[in-house]
């Protein structure tokens, strides 16, 4: 079983229902941007696996997987996508803390998604 629990957050479920009922018209373009200072401080105590490349860590898997699931639940499967994995915090030799992605769904919706857990408020986050 895959646990994408954020799919059922009230605001996400409401948005999905609005799409399904045609309340926003036919979706054509989606932008999802999220910036969190979750790991901006390299001294913050986090589970080791979170940024361990060898353990499958990285922000795309930890958080991006939930947004990818959400987009698929709202708009259907992807036709094409490309992504970049980035580390913007002062951490070294770790899996990414940020990513950016462009996509087209099988239904023709174009979109972009980017998320960073490595930006601090002083970097322009917040």
Image (spheres, rainbow, N blue to C red):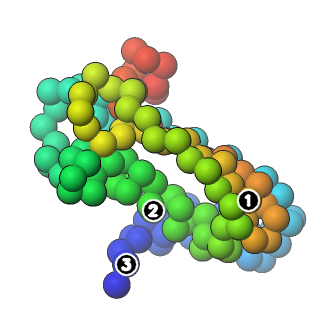
In the picture shown, does residue 54 fall above or below 34? below
In the picture shown, does residue 40 fall above or below 62? above
Q: Nearer the viewer, residue 104 or 63?
A: 104
Residue at 87 percent across and 65 percent down: it is: 25
SS under mark 3:
loop
Pointer 3 local density, CA inside 10 Å: few below 14, some 14–19, many at least 20: few
Residue at 78 percent across and 61 percent down: it is: 109
Residues at marks 3 and 1, CA–CA distance in whole angstroms: 23 Å
First in residue order: circle 3 vs circle 1: 3
Res. 70 image quadrant: bottom right
First in residue order: circle 3 vs circle 2: 3
Whether residue 78 sits left or right of residue 35 in the image: it is right
Contact between labelled residues 1 and 3, with CB atoms less than 8 Å apart? no
Residues at marks 2 and 1, CA–CA distance in whole angstroms: 18 Å
- For the N terminus, the quadrant is bottom left
- The residue pinned by badge 2 equals 66
**Numbered-mark total:** 3
- The residue pinned by badge 1 equals 104
Percent coordinates x, y for residue 19 in the rendering: 74, 69
Farthest residue toward the top? 122
- Mark sitting on residue 2: 3
Q: Nearer the viewer, residue 82 or 120?
A: 82
Whether residue 77 sits left or right of residue 116 in the image: it is right
Contact between labelled residues 2 and 3, with CB atoms less than 8 Å apart? no
Residue at 39 percent across and 21 percent down: it is: 121
Residue at 46 percent across and 25 percent down: it is: 125
Contact between labelled residues 1 and 2, with CB atoms less than 8 Å apart? no
First in residue order: circle 2 vs circle 1: 2
């Amino acid at each position: 079983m895959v646990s994408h629990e954020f799919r059922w957050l009230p605001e996400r479920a409401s948005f999905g229902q609005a799409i399904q009922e045609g309340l926003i018209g036919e979706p054509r373009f989606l932008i999802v941007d999220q910036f969190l200072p979750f790991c901006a401080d390299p001294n913050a105590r986090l589970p080791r696996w979170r940024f361990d490349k060898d353990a499958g860590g990285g922000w795309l898997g930890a958080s991006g997987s939930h947004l990818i699931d959400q987009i698929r639940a709202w708009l259907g499967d992807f036709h094409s996508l490309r992504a970049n994995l980035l580390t913007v915090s002062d951490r070294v030799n770790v899996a990414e803390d940020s990513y950016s992605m462009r996509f087209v769904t099988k239904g023709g919706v174009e979109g972009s998604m980017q998320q960073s857990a490595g930006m601090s408020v002083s970097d322009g986050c917040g």
